Each structure stands twice: as C-alpha cells, then as structure tokens.
Image (tube, helix red, strand yellow):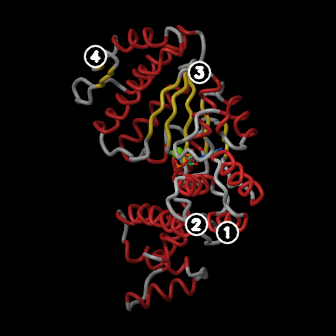
Amino acid sequence: MLFDPRPKTSRSDLYDFEEELERLLHALSEPMVLVSGLRRTGKTSLVLTALNESGLPHVYVDLREGFTSSRELYVLLSRSLSDFVERASRWGRAREVLLRALSRVRGVSVMGLQVSVSWSPRERPLLGELFAALDELGERLGGRVVVVFDEFQRSRGSVGVALHSAIAHSYDFHRNLSFVLTGSEMGVLYGILRNPENPLYGRAYVEIRTRKLSREEALDFLERGFAEAGVRVSASEVERAVEELDGIIGWLAYYGYLRVGGRGDLERVVEEAVELARSELESFLATRVSRRYRLVLKLLAQGVREWGRLKRALEDAEGRELSDRVLHEILHQLRSHSIIDEENNFTDPVVRRAALQL
Ligand SMILES: Nc1ncnc2c1ncn2[C@@H]1O[C@H](COP(=O)(O)OP(=O)(O)OP(=O)(O)O)[C@@H](O)[C@H]1O
Ligand SMILES: [Mg+2]
C-alpha cells in the first residue's frame, strides 16, 4: 500500500525511486554506502527495500534516538542482534552460524532468540568483536552481511567516536561486511565523515541521495494511492495538498493515510503535520539557547532572510549589541541540521509553518 505509514520494505510498495534502488543494490557490494536526504524523503524505505531485494543478511540499528553512553549503545545493539536472529530463518543457516560466533564473544549471552550484550566496563566486548562475529557469518555463508546504522549523524560524543573507530577498523579488515549509513542532517553527517580527526575520515563511500518528488510525481503518487485505496478525492484538493506539502513523500503518504482513514480534510491533516514538525523543532531547541533560535526561526519563516535584518532583530530583542558570531552560529546550526538551505529558505514547508508558531 502506497499510503502505509511505516517504512516500505518491498519494491511493489515503493513509489518511483527505481534508479536510486538500482544504485543502492549495486552499491551493497561496497564496504560503505551513505544514503542521505532530507527528513521523510524515503531513506529508510529505500534501504529496507534494497536489503530485502538483495536477500543479504542484515542487521538494522536505529540510531534516531541517539545514545550518550556505552550502555545505551549496547542496548541498541542487543536489540538489533536479537531482531536479526528472529528474522534469520530466511537466510539459511545464518541464525545458527551467528549464534555460534557470538557465543565465543565475551560479554554476549543468548537466551532463546534474545541476544544480550553486556555493557559493563569489565565484561563488555569491543564493538570490533561484534563486527568480527558478523564478518565470520558472511565468511561462512559465502556472501556479504550488511550492517545498517540509520540516522548515523546521531552517533556523537566519545561513544560515537568509538563506534566510528570500530567501523573504520572493520572497513579495513572485514571483507564480508558492508556498512550502510543513513542521515538526514547533512551538515552534521558530513561533519563526521569529512572531519580529518574522525577515524572514518578518508574512507571512500558511495553516496545515494533521496530527493523530493517533482510536482507531477507528487500528484501522481497521491492519485495512485487514493485509487489503490478506492477513495475519491477531488483534483483540486490533491493539487492543494501538493502545494502545502511539497514533494516530500513522507508528508504526502501521511496525508494520504489520514485522509483515507477518514481522519479529516486537508486542513486537519496539515495541522497535524505542522504539530509533529513543531515538536521536532522543540526537541532541536531543547539543547540550545532557545530564545535566540526561536526568534531567528520565526523571522526566517516570515520571510526575513537578510543578515542585517536578522541581526538587528536579535539585538532589539536583547537590547544590546551582539557579535556577528552569534547569528553565524545559529544559521550554521540550522543549515547543518538541514532545517534551512544556503539561501536561508526552509527545506520543508511544513517545518516553516511550524516555525511560525514558535
Ligand atoms: N518510495 C516510496 N513510496 C511510497 N511511500 C514511501 C516511499 N518512501 C517513503 N515512503 C513513505 O514515507 C514515509 C517516510 O518514509 P521513510 O521513513 O522511509 O523516510 P525517511 O527519509 O527514512 O524518514 P526520516 O527522515 O523520518 O527517517 C513513510 O510513511 C513511508 O511509507
Ligand atoms: Mg528514516
């Protein structure tokens, strides 16, 4: 179903993106692949569909929530490995082979299909030892094993660097592993991969970008989705929806899903989308000097994009002069997180509307 709100996993549910899918399938034989693109443009769907199509065994680690300690990272890895073991029957002997390899790694215990990796400093395995077990799985099965880190830019801090370092080591030595990294905050992502001080620096990767649909594609996507669901929606509403939501497939699917479910008209759905975008902006603001960010976001949303006007507004709000660095840093952060582009335009019209409400 085109409007299914979960990430797609099969080619038949994936609208368009044929070319990206072929490129990704091809790239899975490389040691490292980056799938980058704005939020809700179908990165996870593309990756999961390619992996299903490829038939390659894969471990999927969702880093969206981030981690600030080894404990949090190891819990995520335990979950991902358990999930792998649960799904493994489709990959022949994969379950048995992996469990055997893992049982030799210190700090790893297996109960039924649950893999649990200890995070205690005395017992925990090195991340490299876990990757080695997966490499051995590939070796034994005679093919590649893929490890996906979704929203990779969330791997920050010292534990993040430990992960980057383990991936770098694995890149160099584990011939049967491929890493697929995805990211939606482009500046932050490149801040990791293109930073000479990062262990991953200098390792080549293939990059595949997801994109917004063109206006025609977006209209076609909605029409097909509604036809598939047997729901009639006027052409003018569909056009307005594309105007409001742009070619961001995640928003279009969200609209289609709620609309088909009878959860209100376009206006209601857009309101819900804006609400969602607002709570995401709030979590971005939570870790920053938020009154300044709020003001800049609001002004940008109102169409004030010139440096001088933005700076003056910040100074008026605080009643004192501010150094250029303040506004520089704010705009830099907004760009790094792909909230605005180089011309200070919002990358997503729904986020712009959310910013108006800050
Ligand atoms: N090619 C596609 N065809 C149909 N629906 C899609 C497609 N790509 C994505 N979607 C839908 O759009 C929504 C977002 O997709 P997905 O989670 O794959 O995007 P994402 O880029 O990983 O998003 P995020 O940045 O939030 O992680 C989901 O509802 C998914 O079903
Ligand atoms: Mg995703």
Q: Nearer the viewer, mark 3 or mark 2?
A: 2
Which residue position is annotated with label 1?
Answer: 240
Quick one: label 3, few (<14), some, or many (20+) residues within 10 Å? Answer: some
| Of the pair 52 and 132, the residue shown nearer to us | 52
Q: Position of residue 129 (x, y in %)?
A: 40, 20
The answer as to whether callout 4 falls within 8 Å of ligand 2 is: no
Q: Position of residue 110 (x, y in %)?
A: 30, 16
Q: Amino acid at mark 4?
A: Met
Quick one: label 1, few (<14), some, or many (20+) residues within 10 Å? Answer: some
Quick one: label 4, few (<14), some, or many (20+) residues within 10 Å? Answer: few
**Are the two marked residues, 3 and 4, in contact with CB atoms closer than 8 angstroms?**
no
| Of the pair 321 and 233, the residue shown nearer to us | 233
Q: Amino acid at mark 3?
A: Leu
Relative height, residue 96 to residue 211 (above, below): above
- Which of the numbered marks, if any, corresponds to residue 266? 2
Which residue position is annotated with label 3?
Answer: 56
Q: Amino acid at mark 2?
A: Leu
Report the quarter where the N terminus lies: top right
Q: Position of residue 92 (x, y in %)?
A: 53, 10
